[in-house]
Amino acid sequence: MDNRRKFMGKAVLAGVGLSLAPQAISFAGSRPKAGKRVGIIGLDTSHSLAFTKAFNASDAAADLGGYKVVAAYPHGSRDIASSVDRIPGYTEEIQPLGVEIVDSIAALLDKVDVVLLETNDGRLHLEQALEVFKSGKTVFIDKPISASLVDAIAIFEAAKKYNVPVFSSSSLRYMENAVAVRNGEIGKVLGAEAFSPAKLEPTHPDLFWYGIHGVETLYTLMGTGCEIVQRTFTPGADVVVGTWEGGRIGTFRGIRSGKSGYGGRAFGEEGIMDMGSYGGYRPLLVEIAKFFDSGKAPVSEAETIEIFAFMQAADESKKINGQAVSLQAVLDKARREAAEIEI
């Protein structure tokens, strides 16, 4: 997973502005204010370490809300080697940042006010999120929110049942130019294209594991309303074309060979804008802090579910040699299956 590791490594530096110098970072030794204690579930991703370094820095910016990571439960994927292999190292690295390691989610929930569900393996998210929901604690679920559209729907239904705020997002949503387009910089968006690495992981549907970064970028630009999805697959790349209501067209390119990267372009009534380079984690962390403060998700349930329906429809299109798949049909089937899950 070279592309994934390169991206994560760059993001740790770009996203939180940290130096590699050994003495460059100091961390607050005082206990956080009541309501500001953060717990992490899952130390199998570099996000856990990078997010902790940002929140726990003694000079953390005010827009990070005063939140501090105080405890972590390491697990975490148990059978994806690229994730499992990270747990011992990240467990060791995170403790000097003022983080206590606990042996269960229940123990974690006793020590914290809000939760970052960072487990890299989306198959575990519904089970882990349910335990958090039942405690009543607000939770951010890192991408992918789940390893299936059915579980994604079930997670949101459970959040409503237990009246717990939840949201999920890739940090790619918060690229500066993507936010500008979303806020109307080029008028109504008539079409867009986005690209990202799309490394495959056998335990997850093809785009759920890493292609979600580019799909989330596409949805940031286009918004909801996709009706038809068609996918062309080769070992080295994916091209997924979505047709939105009103005939707007959005395209995702997933990269598995050659030079990789993140970006896109939006075509609006008043201009065309390139997305530019990825800016790191910090904008996402600011949104997470705001979410913890307000309980109001910056990304709607409807949009997150449609992102996963888009990726699921792309999988279905692949199975039938690139024929068009109705997004609504995929959603309807998944909602019926989700209704059978006990939450």
Image: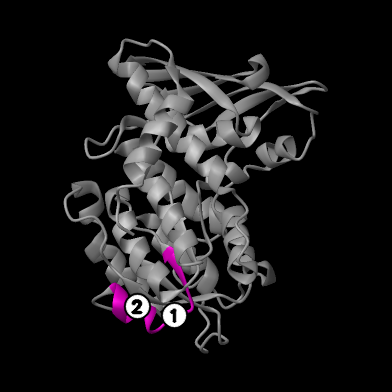
Secondary structure beneath label 2: helix
Task: Give the vertical position of 214 relative to 16 (above or below).
Answer: above
| Viewer-closest of 56 and 37 | 37
Please tell me how crowded label 1 is: few (under 14), some (14-19), or many (20+) other residues with Cα within 10 Å. many
In which quadrant will I find the C terminus?
bottom left
Is residue 51 in view? yes
Q: Name the residue under label 2.
A: 108
From this view, report whether residue 10 is shown above or below residue 207. below
Check if mark 2's residue and mark 1's residue have beta carbons within 8 Å.
yes
Where residue 40 sits in the image (x, y, percent)? 39, 68
Query: Residue at (50%, 78%) from the top-left corner?
Result: 27
Residue at image point 48% right, 27% down: 328
Q: Nearer the viewer, residue 221 or 259?
A: 221
Say what secondary structure mark 1 lies in.
Answer: loop
User: On the rendered image, what quadrant is the N terminus found in?
Assistant: top left
Instruction: Identify whether 156 is placed above or below 138.
Output: above
Q: Distance between the residues labelled 2 and 1?
A: 7 Å
Residue numbers of the magenta segment: 105-116
Find residue 288 and report its horizontal and vertical position in percent.
57, 61
Residue 112, magenta (yes or no): yes
Residue 224 place in picture, x, y as percent: 60, 33
- Residues 105 and 87: in front is 105
Query: Which amino acid, by three-letter code, is at mark 2?
Result: Leu
Residue sitting nearer the eye, 329 or 258 = 329
Q: Name the residue under label 1.
A: 112
Q: Where is residue 320 in the image (x, y as percent from the top left)?
A: 30, 12
Which amino acid, by three-letter code, is at mark 1? Val
Outermost residue, bottom direction? 30
Q: In which quarter of the image is residue 255?
A: top left
Please give the name of the residue rendered at 18% of the width and 48% of the height, measured from the top-left corner. 81
